[in-house]
Amino acid sequence: MSKTIEKFNKILTKEIEKIRNEDEISPKNERICSQNIKQEILQKNERTSMTPINKKNFARLCEELEENKITPNQIVIQIGLGIQETYRFSIRILALLIPGLDILQKFYDKKKGMIPIMSIYLAGNFIAKTNNYDIKKTLETSSKIYKFVNKYVDMYYPKIKNFVIYNFDIPYDSKLQEELVTYIPTISNDLKLSKYFEKLKQFEQHHSCHPNTFVTTYKLYAIANAYYSAAYCDPFNILRDKKYLILIGGISEKPFFSITNEIYEKTRMPWKIIPLILDNICQKVAYYYYEKVKDPLTSEDYILSISNIYNVHNTIKNDLQLLIERGITKEIISTLL
């Protein structure tokens, strides 16, 4: 074999190997693919964009998904809802659900059957007991919220509705109350956590619907959030074979999520927690009704708001614009309510 032919064969062999490896993920392509997963989950450049509090865990999630070290059905996405003393809830509650449901839908479209589950919970008994609300009215409101949310998921996300779990009317007995109350002094003595508690107190005094009551209950609320967000246990028994728990909330949830994340960092449960904060929507708590900003309660309120969207208060405008973009009409709201 001449040296020219031998040289040509070496070049040809290299080119063949290059073609064979085109489908394999090079370090550069791996970064690109991981970036695509990051983009899909965080939904950047969209109204529903989010930012992770625990960036390390989020980066690991993207890498492990890309490298097939975990499957999407080892992920749980969780959203917590609440009730205020007026026993009313805003139609904007849908804006809080859409980002998480979109993640499920994207995974479904790519890998049918291998998708995360979504947990939506409302601790009505805890809320009523902690705030001295009327238990009957609280649970009635909880039932209305459940029906509203459930109908929406069935109507708009029929392919993934069986992957959504509802945890409403969760028991809150004296044993759990004692457990949470007993836990408060332990974490209150932690210097880093005490700083988060102070930030939470200041935030809630300005943004809470019931700031006077919250002065005495904010630590219990923070511990309860950590409990329901699986920072140190599995309250809903859904994480046994799971690797990641993604928490989604608006800016009002950020102080709670920061405390939950810090407690998780100390307990190191088998699953990793990733709190995501919404960047644009849910600046006002999505499930609370804010009369001063003319928050929509009914289908009539909703049509008035969206027909005059540019005059809607800035703190709820993005929420309503998202609902408009998703084709939610007055008639649909009437059906849901």
Image (cartoon, rainbow, N blue to C red):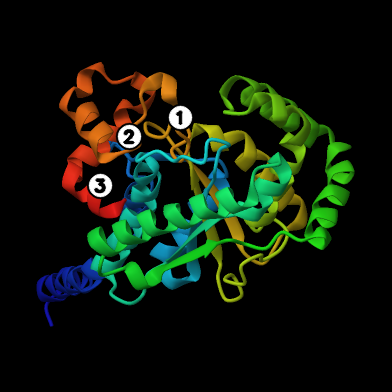
Q: Which amino acid does label 3 sit on?
A: Ile
Say which of 280 and 87 sits in front. 87
Other-residue count near label 3 (Cα within 10 Å), few / some / many at <14 / 14–19 / ≥20? some
* Residue designated by label 3: 333
In the picture, the quarter occupied by the N terminus is bottom left
Count of marks placed on residues: 3
Instruction: Give the residue number, with chain letter if any, for mark 1.
Output: 284
What's under tag 1, amino acid-wise? Lys
Does residue 245 sit above or below 236 in this rendering?
above
Instruction: Answer whether labels 3 and 2 touch (C-beta < 8 Å).
Output: no
Instruction: Tell me if residue 27 can be seen.
Output: no
Q: How far apart are marks 3 and 1 (CA)?
A: 20 Å
Residue 102 in the image, given as x and y percentages of width and height: 31, 54
Question: Which x, y percent locates residue 208?
Answer: 59, 28
Left or right of residue 226, residue 208 in this image: left
- Asked if labels 1 and 2 touch by Cβ distance under 8 angstroms, the answer is yes
At a point 33% along the width and 49% down the height, the residue shown is 98
Q: What residue type is labelled 2?
A: Asp
Residue 164 location, quadrant: bottom left
Q: Mark 1: which secondary structure?
A: loop
The percent coordinates of residue 116 (x first, y second) are 42, 67
* Residue at x 56%, y 55% (from the top left corner): 139
Q: Return the residue at label 2.
A: 319
In this rendering, would 77 be left or right of 34? right
Q: Position of residue 265 (x, y in %)?
A: 71, 50
Q: Disc 2 on helix, strand or loop?
A: helix
Q: Is residue 10 left or right of residue 237?
A: left
Real-space CA distance between mark 3 and mark 2, rounded to the nearest whole angstrom? 15 Å
SS at circle 3: helix
